[in-house]
Image: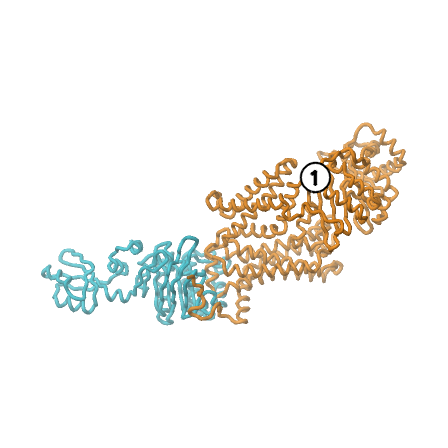
Amino acid sequence: MKSNNYYSEHSGQVRKTGEGFGEYFRLSRVWAGENLKRFWAIPAFVMLCYLLTLLLPIMTDFDTSYAESIAGFRNAGLTFYSILFPLITTLTLNRYLFGTGSVNVTHSLPLTRGRLWFSNFLCGLLMMWVPTAITYALIAVIEPDHIAGLETSFFKLILCQAFYLTLFNLAAILTGNIVMHIITSAFLTLLPLATVLAFLATLEMMIYGFQMDWFLNRQIFGFVPPMAMTANDSYNFAGESFGWWYYVLVAAFAIALYAAGAYLYSRRKLERAGDSFVFKPFQLFFVSCAAIAGGGVLGTLFWSLWGGTFPWNLGLPLGAAIAFAIAKMSAAKTLRIFNKGSLCHLAISFALLLIVLGAFEFDLFGMERHVPDADEIVSADVSFGVLPTGLDLSKPVTITDPEVIDAVREIHELAVNSDVSLRPDYFQSDYVDRYENRSVRIIIDYALKNGRTFRRAWTATMPMFADSDAFRRVIDGEEFQAAMNIENAVKDKHISGIHLELFHSRYYEGYYGNIYGISLNSVEYAPFLRALQADRDKVDFVAAAYTELPDALFEVEIGLLDYLEDEDPRRMSDWFRVRIGDDYSNTIQWLREQGYYDALTEQMREASEYTD
Amino acid sequence: MIKVENLHKNFDELAALNDFSINVKSGSVYGLIGINGSGKTTALKAITGIIRPDRGDVSFDGEAVYENLRVKRRMGFIPDDLHFFGSYTLKDSAEFYRRLFPRWDNSRYREMSEIFGLPVRKRMNRFSKGMLKQAAFILTMAAKPDFLILDEPIDGLDPIVRKLVWKYIMADAAERNMSVLVSSHNLREMEGVCDTVGIVDKGRIVLERDLDELRSDIHKVQTAWSKPADGDAIAGLPNLKVLRREKSGAVEHLIIRANRELLEVKINEMRPLLFDMLPLSLEEIFIYELGGERDEIKQLLF
């Protein structure tokens, strides 16, 4: 029978480490002190980064584009720092684990593994937190003008740093060399929170031909701590983000990771120092996850490279096989991976892949084909990508009318059962009929009576909905019609002005460049812009206006920017580019009929004089 | 006293330790001899608490070693694969050891640094392998361990330094009752330093002998007789066993297992022309003790 009495038989004291409370911290301080003495360059590097990207731009108060770019980096930089600094710190502090000699000597010293783990963690925190605290204190003292949101930003940054320190420490324990430590750190950072989501979205897209909404809206990274803690618009750490529950969740995760790392350290097989993975089962886990995630990522790549025609049932296994081979080579540290063990791993990986594929293919979770019952629904936010609602094409319209909600449910069922044959010529619309082959992006976001939401999104071709009576009923409903009314939209959005940018591109010394634009900053132009947006055949009026300018012009880009109160201009979705033709008579005539020709040409002259 | 009982350690399919047991008495030097891959280093790692055996017990004066600071503070280990903080000087390392080991003796550190002639302010990543070994030895001995464990300690050291190293070890073993466990793949290296020798093969001790007992039992004798038949008569004497007999002209060399006093009395009674007791090397003792027949022993000797 296996004996586990390694501690007990002689001493009679199981797991007695021979240290008191005070002694624990004294020796921890010794080890942490040695770490700081040896690796002082890390906090120095952290401080230098902060100095160059946070303190100097603030202190010098540059009012230049350079300062703006630094400020931009400052915001994004905190996201970057919250991952980079912990990675560098753990790589350095845990380096002794990766060599047989160093790990032997270290563990023969009178330092327990628990103490080493705690001391290294504490030391890593100090190396990042002290420079961070100094930097924030300096900002608060030197530039009180920049103090807004400082404490929030500081709190988020140190929380992120602590979280990633525990995560990367765990990676250090799992791995046996520095390369695999970095790979595993990246893997642990991205895999659970992003890669799986990407894979699920990919599956949806490839199997059903639909796209999940969040896939395109960077929400795929929205749960990765630093991104999740920034405001959505600018990666600004001082801005609004998730509530306090998210920070508690991150802190709880960090504590769990710390405990897992400490436990695994006590079980770590030191003779495997230098191997890719100290824990062999993790190699299988790593390779399998890499195969599944790689299947999704590479499958998407093949799919997009072939213009969306590459079959998913070939792309996924091919991508998975390639990812498996790369992961296996990394893990085994050799190119010779074709052996009995690898085949076993490959079989397991593909079995897992098949399970995941099967789960989606047969909709085991019931999510793909689920349509909420009418009595479950409070309201439904609906948007169709081709119909202008407000000043945007994708602004959702909230439907509360029960009869129209029924129509929404019918659209949902149509999307789910997309094999229904539909006639393309039934639905006639000024907006839709010209885009017969265009994709329609349909998003339905139900608000349910149980307080939850249920959101589905699809991309389908126009003919699919052309014969749909439900579609007609939705857009003919009062709520949708109200949203499509431009004046209502202007009123609803509190728009102070509308900005029409007319750029012309000119070939100049080997480059095409946007030379200048003009603006129509008045609400009175709204109907004109709406007409312009709706009827693109008329857009070459712009070119006609430009013909009065002396330089040779190639094309004109037109787009709408909305000016909301107290906000920067936001580029709207409907941008297009027009090449200049020879016949402008219809356009000019149309412009004159509309009464806009004089105003436009007047402003263009002014712009021309200004820029020339 | 270091007591190791029934250690087992497997690396995947390989049984690196298989029922490994030894006892190292206080104040004695135990030589662990084995060919490369026999399990010596694994045994030492398990004994020093670096790795955790699958089964078995290790105790130092009755206390388990694994994660036990009380034991580790009294233990010094010099592995074959040395490692120091790269940017440190010997002085820096000494300071680190001073803070870890409560019985650190600074005067001893200074004395040994001078005697060994190592530069204390030079970064240790610029030391040669031999210098690193010496540095490890200085640091370990200055910590005044009660238990000293050495893995191939004199590899890479020149003969003068070897002698110096052993001088310190023997002195501490004698004066402070320090227990010493030393591994080597070469029996000759253990000559004159070990009290007990254990031969390890395939993860287990296949032979363990107290060298004093061995030396008192086996003797090399040089004789010459007026009549050759007198020499043959030795083999017939009671309480005495001739293990080997070689004749070179009139002089005969015999390896005899017997009590030394008894042997001297018996041979003198036979009035030889020449009778001398010659020194026996450790190597010869093992050869004659085992008849040079066992493969694991042969590999250590030849």
Dot 1 lies on which element? loop
Which of the pair A298/A461 is nearer the observer? Answer: A461
Which of the pair B175/A489 is nearer the observer? Answer: A489
Q: Is residue A52 visible?
A: no
Left or right: residue A545 compared with residue A222? right
Q: Quadrant of the N terminus of chain A?
A: bottom left
* Residue at position x 16%, y 64% in the image: B275
Give the chain letter for cyan: B
Which of the pair A213/B225 is nearer the observer? Answer: A213
Give the chain letter for orange: A
Subunit of label 1: A
Image height check: is B3 above or below B34? below
Category of crowding for the residue at label 1, using alpha-carbon neighbours closer than 10 angstroms: few (below 14), some (14–19), many (at least 20): some
User: Which residue carries the number 1 mark?
Assistant: A418
Q: Residue B168 at x, y = what percent?
A: 37, 66
Image height check: is A393 above or below B29? above
Q: Residue A442 at x, y = what percent?
A: 74, 43
